[in-house]
Amino acid sequence: MAAGLLKVHLSADAYLACLTHVLSAEKEEVMGVLLGELQEEIKTVLVRGVSVMRRIDKRADRVEISPEQLTAIVIDTERLSNKSGYPLRVVGWYHSHPHITVFPSHIDIKTQANYQLMDDNFVGLIFSCFNEEPQDKKCKLQVIAFQSLQTNPSPPEYERLELPLSIVQTPLSHISSLCMEALVQIPVVLFQEEEEAYTNTNPNENQDVVTQMYNSSVYTQSLTQMLDILCGPLLGLFQEAVARNKQMTEELTREKNQLLKDLVEQENNDVII
């Protein structure tokens, strides 16, 4: 590890939210914003949560969001800070690389460089997913943290600077409200994108019936697939979380009642003495 190199700590529940998002789309890249804190004394970016971004352009090798969206999440960070109890800020971004290597493209490096003009400590995460190994035909998932390092001022040239990345363990039963909100946000954003794409395929009423039926069937198939591979597992995750919380509440209630009982007995013994 290079001395003075910025480190990235990603909480386990934020990692779960990122994985859920990047695995929701196999054909196009997805993108989100990292929320957390900068611990300057130890040169560490602590990522506590994410915010899912709605794409303005869906491609297999590129993803874009509007400046208005980024501004909106910066403004919303105050609400999220109050909700989570942490002094949150936008500390970086993440996006997926479906079926390709985890390393940033020249476009990714340039985008990261532009972000660093606003904040030197801004970091990027890339998740390589659905990338099949030629030897055993198994898909692997990789993630790296990086920044852009300027190698030439004029004309400006950059190269990737990989950062140390670690996953910070959290209790298995704990998913923060910040990450829970992100998990709920994922299918909502994907539905909005599908709805917009479907609406754009029907710009007027002069389309022939076959075209309308085809577009409708593709739209229905996309929503059905979303329910099957995303909404179903998420619902199961939330149900398990509710069950764990209910069990924990019952255990704490029994412990509380026992402590109250012991307290009353102790007071009675003190009176007798």
Image (tube, rainbow, N blue to C red):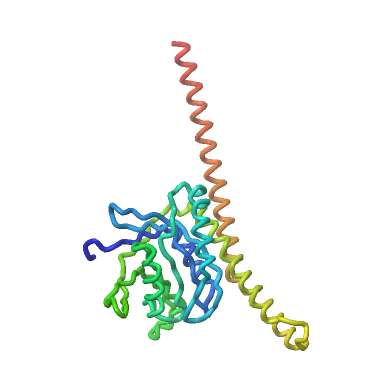
Q: Where is residue 28 in the image (x, y as percent from the top left)?
A: 52, 78
Residue at 73% over, 87% down? 211
Identified at 54% across, 50% down, the residue is: 244
Rendered position, 131 above or below 252: below
221, above or below 16, in the image: below
Q: Residue 226 location in percent, x, y?
A: 61, 71
Q: Which residue lies furthest to the left in this view?
A: 3
Looking at the picture, how far across and down is residue 36, in whole percent? 42, 56
In the rendered view of the protein, which quadrant contains the C terminus?
top left
Residue name at image x 54 percent, y 78 percent: 58
Left or right of 220? Residue 47 is: left
Residue lying at the far top in this picture: please name it. 273
Q: Quadrant of the N terminus?
A: bottom left
The quadrant in which residue 99 appears is bottom left
Number of labelled discs? 0
- Classify residue 131 as left or right of residue 199: left
Q: Residue at x 36, y 71 (%)?
A: 113
Residue 144 place in picture, x, y as percent: 36, 70
Of the pair 191 and 40, the residue shown nearer to us: 40
Instruction: State the image quarter where residue 154 is shown.
Output: bottom left
Image quadrant where residue 97 sits:
bottom left
Front residue of this view, candidates 158 and 59 = 158
